Amino acid sequence: MVIQDEAFHGSDLEKIAAIYNIRQEDIIPFASNVNPLGISPMAKQALIDNIDAIKTYPDRDYVALRTSISKYCNIQPDKIVLGNGTSELISRTLKAIQPANTMIMGPTYSEYERAANAVGSKVTTYMLRNSDDFELDVELFLENLSSEMDLLIICNPNNPTGKAITKEDMSQIVEKCASLDIIVLVDETYVEFVKDIDAISSVSLVKRYNNLIVLRGISKFFASPGLRLGYAITDNAAFLESANNNKIPWNINSLATVASVMFEDEHYINLTKSLIQTERNLVYSALASRKTIKVFKPDANFILIKLLKENQTSEQVFASCIQKGFMIRDCSDYEGLGNRYIRFCFMKPEQNDDLVNTLLEIV
């Protein structure tokens, strides 16, 4: 059995296939956190019908694309900043704000810290705890905010814990930050998977707080990471001016505009939400009673598990699963977790059943 020293990203299928001598097409990507239904049928047909769009430059101002996102999020088009995926937007946001001091709520996605380091920002991590099931104590958190901070970054729902902060609690956080002149960046990459998006999403708060920037993308829920489309929603005039003045022309490809009909595909959207909610409940119920693991009840489309069996590590469990074609996420490279945590997303029912049965044999 091969045991790797590194933890793989969900997109590292080619590398993993070579190391473990497995055909890439035989790997089920439980680490990718991508919608198992694939791309929207409406978007797929639009791409097929309009493939010639790549022969011309896209509209420099992306009016049609902004309008689609505006209707989908119920926000004015001029409050939307487009990016080549959320990763680019994270970097552009940090460059625009130039924060001297950044607080990141962890454990979480490492790209936030990397982007902060790139602009010379001093990073402080507010680490949520296993003992609290990685749930946020809002009152305690508010006490840790100070005017010395310039930027607060929160992933909601959070990767890798799968936990969500309610809009009501987020409103308290953003309001306190406004009083301290702190900008809040909320990454909502996974928010469309939650049971009740209106209770979680901060998009509507943008209309009340100009110190709030909300990020979203189409890689996960709409299963389109290759289109590289992300968007920021904000009423922060300084950020909007910077984003508009310093944007790279035609940074979004023509096909992303063509595929924007995905935002209107209500059947696909509802089917995805129903599938994920059902599988989330079933997988959690199947694993929660096992005494050799601690299962953190998820709000997103993935689940975090702590291994409790003595001497069993995340690397070992990853290796055992990949040999059977199941690529889960070894979370040992997440700050604050260590080598006892694994994460996997919810795929199709029969695939989830096979992985759960495999895990129950291992743990």
Image (spheres, grey):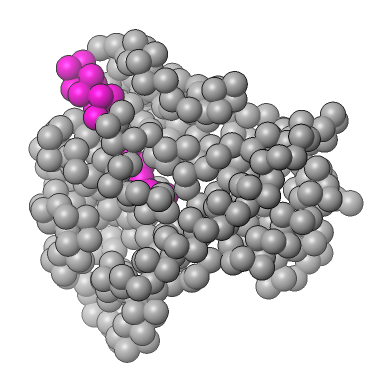
| In the image, residue 14 lies in the stretch drawn in magenta | no
Residue in the picture at 31% in, 73% down: 265
**Quarter assignment of residue 346:** bottom right
Bounds of the magenta segment: 171-191
| In the image, residue 178 lies in the stretch drawn in magenta | yes
Q: Residue 113 at x, y = what percent?
A: 45, 31
Residue in the picture at 78% in, 45% down: 317
Q: Residue 325 at x, y = what percent?
A: 75, 63
> Against 267, is 163 above or below?
above
**Quarter assignment of residue 77:** bottom left
Which residue is at the front of the view, 191 or 89?
A: 191
Which residue is at the front of the view, 321 or 119?
A: 321
**Which image quarter holds the C terminus?**
top right
Residue in the picture at 28% in, 47% down: 198
**Quarter assignment of residue 323:** bottom right
Q: Residue 163 at x, y = what percent?
A: 47, 37
Residue in the picture at 23% in, 19% down: 176
> Against 320, is 138 above or below?
above
Q: Residue 33 vs residue 171: left or right?
A: right
Q: Residue 229 vs residue 244: left or right?
A: right
Q: Residue 18 at x, y = what percent?
A: 76, 62
> Against 175, is 266 above or below?
below
* Residue 240 appears in the figure: yes
